Amino acid sequence: MAALNLNMLTENASRLGMRLQETLSEHTRDLAIARGTGSAYLDNPEEKVKNIAKQLDSNSDREKLEAMKRLIALISRGRNVSEFFAQVVKNVASHNLEIRKLVYIYLLRYAEQEPDLALLSINTFQKDLSDPNPLIRAMALRVLSGIKVPMIGSIVVLAIKKCAADISPYVRKAAALAIPKIYHLDSTHQPELIKIICTLLKDQSPLSIGSVAVAFEAVCPTRLDLLHQHYRRLCRTLIDVDEWGQVDLLNLLVRYARVMLPRPIPSNEASSSTQFEVDSDLRLLLTSAEPLFQSQNPAVVLAVARVFYYLGPPTDLPKIVPPLLRLLHVSSEVERVILTNLVLISSTVSDVLAKSYTYLLVRADDSRQVKKSKIQLLRSVVNAENYPSLLREFICYADDADDDLVADSIQAIGYTARIVPESTQQCLAALMSFIQSKHDVIVTNAVLVLKSLVQIRIQQQQSIIAIGGLPPQTFSPLEIISRLARRIDELRHPKARACVVWLVGQYAASIPTTGNGHTPLGPEGIAPWAPDVLRKMAKSFQQEASHVKLQILTLAAKLLVLNPSDRTIGLLNRYVFSLARYDLDYDVRDRGRTLSALLAGVNANIYGENDDAHEDVGGVVLRREQVRVVLFEGKASPAEDVAKDAEDDHGRFGSLAAITGRWTGSDNYLPDWLEEGTESSLRDSEADMPQMPAYTSQSSAPRSIAGPTATRASPVVLTPTGRASPVGSIVRQEGAKAAYMDLDKFYEDTEETEESEESASEDDDSNEDEDGEGSGDDEDAAARSSEGESESTGDEGESEGDSVNENSHLQGTTR
């Protein structure tokens, strides 16, 4: 029996579970469709695609919504679903808002391919422009302007004009965004669109003003005169505009300020040498834009920095650095953009960046472009205070696996040695250690940097000696050249070998001395290591690169000019010039013929005495001293890093051109400052006019105790006054109560009035009793009672006299 009951309970439980599962699946079906995960609609087999047309023709909104979602999913995957255009257009007037949204998205995608069918829905869109729901009105205008059919341009312009005067700011924003679309479709509507833009510029709502700026830049970017009356209001509204609208509006106001406002000029006051005179309207823009430095949108912060960089006085430039450094940790993409823009202004704000150089240290996970920008920024902030730390960073970066970073870091070490003289010894020690490295990239870049440093130092020593001074004994440039010459075989990079050969030839005439003052052995007038370098390079001449061969020929010619009588140098010259004569590179052949002709006055038989192929072309033959001047003198000094002029970039900072390196159509090219701005009165509007105090008409009541102070909007201060009433106020008669301006006085006067009224009422009662006993005259009693009432009311003094006369008149009439 127990087993039977257990089986029944088990069977009933299973049935109940199945029923609950069916009920839950049925009731959660709508929820699953509404939730609609992306994978459910992205996985569309062919059977479901074939059923889309049937679902669109169905009477069920659920089926239509599911079909539209599948169509949008297919569009996102790049599939062409224009075959369902006819079925989709039928649902453009659906009462379901979700279906209508998806239909609008579909029409925006395929209206250009099916213009004839899209025109069938124009009437529906025009009808939706009058829909009570502002969302429907905005979407209808968006789709209508997105149909790229030129024949409906006039209809779209009328729709934009209607929506520009809509009560909803969202619809007005949609109207502003539709203006660039119709302008690109048919530019003949520009005059009408400019009128609509002028109407939208008067909009007080900050929601649509950013889109109006976009429309202005697209349709009439040069008509900055249209902004005169709205400039100050746009500056004040800037803080309330949406984020991307702030970016567009700031770019527009920057262009306006560069054209219409005077640039800041130094103050003429002697005590304020660092102060600048800034126009009031320009100061309004800077003041209104400064709070946006705290924005969470990096584009807004960069746009505000652009405003201060191109419009603000130099004293305001330090304000742009901390907000930009804050954005370095937002994302890797934002970091690259910010660093690229900081490189453009690094020479201007180097002092501020030097205090925060820790933000610019290279990390291992940085991209190549970010590393390059950081190295450039660190170079720009090197000074006498932070060079020890930065020099250690550069030396560490030289061991990186990225060859570009290695080259930039070694170049930065050489730059530090030139900028900070105190660091020269440490920089040279680091560069000389790099020469012993096993990596060609490190050795090559170290040689290139040493070449420039040697040139600069030798020129400095020559200039010091020329004025009668003693050169500093920090390091000997010739000693560096001798060490490089001895390691010429270890250098494998062609550019590095060419640099060493050039250094040896250029400074071969500078004979070094040892510590004891003795001159090393070698050919007369030539450094001892120079001929050996020529011997080694002549041996490997055929395997060298073309630019190395050119320097070998120059080295041979220089040594021959310095000592024409040396037999070894003469033989080396004959061998090198003979190889160059039949070289495959025509540059090498031309260089050999040029130098052989130049050396005709030094050694006529440069190719040997038995050379029959040599032809004497004639011409002027230079002497040895002249040839020496040609080969040694007039060599250009190494190019120094010259900062670009920030005034000539025309708005590159903060634009796309800073990233791509070229101007594009979306960039705001800034014109030059004008000498004098336009008149400030052109920017005056009704909102800027001083407001006159408003006076209301006096009431027709019999009494008036307040003057103009009662009608002003300013608060009334209750203070006693004994002065005369202002002009235009009502003159208070005698017996009338004064206007109370002190609350305590008001209460004291009220208590006195109540006491006087009580005493007057007691006197009236006693008089009434006496009159009732003596005469019993009703008219006399009525007269006295009316007299008492007139006294108890507390009216003006004239009412009391009127009541006495009336009482006398009544008594006379009774008699």
Image (tube, rainbow, N blue to C red):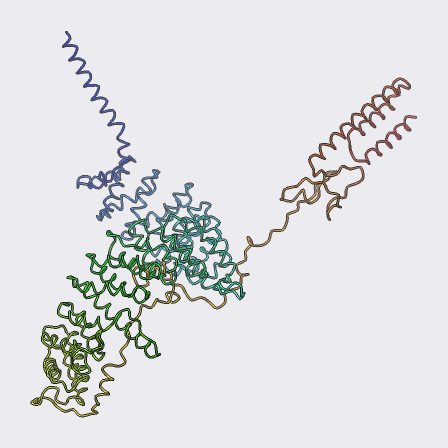
Residue 594 visible in the snapshot: no
Q: In this orientation, which residue lies closer to the viewer: 303 or 195?
A: 303
Q: In this orientation, which residue lies closer to the viewer: 153 or 472?
A: 472
Q: Is residue 701 depicted above or below 153 in this figure? A: above
Quarter residue 130 falls in? top left
Residue 324's x, y, as percent?
A: 37, 53
Q: Is residue 704 depicted above or below 755 in this figure? A: below
* Residue at point 78%, 33% (across, down): 795
Count of all numbered marks drawn on residues in the image = 0
Specify the quadrant that holds the N terminus.
top left
Specify the quadrant that holds the C terminus.
top right
Which residue lies most toward the front here?
A: 516
Residue 621's x, y, as percent?
A: 20, 91
Q: Is residue 12 depicted above or below 99 in this figure? A: above
Which residue lies most toward the right here?
A: 815
Residue 397's x, y, as percent?
A: 24, 57
Residue 146's x, y, as percent?
A: 34, 51
Q: Is residue 434 depicted above or below 552 in this figure? A: above
Residue 48 visible in the snapshot: yes
Q: In this orientation, which residue lies closer to the viewer: 569 or 276?
A: 569
Quarter residue 440 falls in? bottom left
